[in-house]
Image (cartoon, helix red, strand yellow):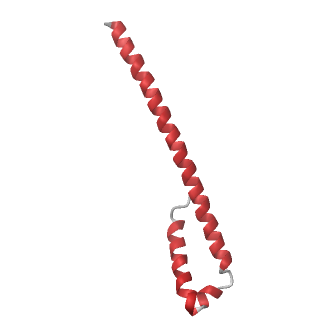
């Protein structure tokens, strides 16, 4: 009886180890993805600020509304950055 219990415990621990290892690897992949997304959002934000640093696009009636909408989208994306 004790041998069977030991075998069951050993199998449970071994299976648990592989499950935990798999979950950690997936978590690390997701962390890398989130970091890359955050870097992309930061890059877009900086580029958007650089493009209109003098306010020419916002002041232009024809494309000002479009640029304003792009800035709103960027502000929404900024909420997903890592801080």
Horizontal relation, residue 3 to residue 79: left or right: left
- Picture coordinates of residue 82, whole percent (x, y): 56, 57
Residue furthest to the bottom: 61
Residue visible at 34% across and 7% down in the picture: 2
Q: From what the image shows, is residue 53 above or below residue 37?
A: below
**Residue 1 sits in which quadrant?**
top left
Q: From what the image shows, is residue 44 above or below residue 21?
A: below
Q: From what the image shows, is residue 76 above or below residue 8?
A: below
Q: Is residue 28 visible?
A: yes
Residue furthest to the front: 62
Q: Is residue 83 visible?
A: no
Residue visible at 38% across and 17% down in the picture: 9
Residue visible at 44% across and 32% down in the picture: 19
Horizontal relation, residue 81 to residue 4: left or right: right
Count every numbered label the image shows and give the total: 0
| Image quarter in which the C terminus is found | bottom right
Horizontal relation, residue 83 to residue 10: left or right: right
Residue visible at 50% across and 43% down in the picture: 27
Q: From what the image shows, is residue 1 above or below residue 28?
A: above
Residue furthest to the left: 1
- Picture coordinates of residue 53, whole percent (x, y): 68, 80
- Foreground residue, 26 or 55? 26
- Picture coordinates of residue 59, whole percent (x, y): 60, 90
């Amino acid at each position: 009886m004790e041998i069977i219990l030991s075998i069951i415990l050993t199998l449970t621990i071994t299976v648990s180890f592989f499950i935990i290892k798999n979950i950690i690897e997936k978590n690390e992949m997701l962390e890398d993805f989130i970091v890359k997304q955050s870097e992309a959002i930061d890059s877009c934000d900086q580029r958007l600020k650089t493009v209109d640093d003098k306010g020419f696009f916002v002041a232009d009636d024809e494309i000002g509304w479009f640029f304003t909408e792009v800035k709103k989208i960027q502000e929404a994306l900024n909420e997903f950055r890592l801080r």
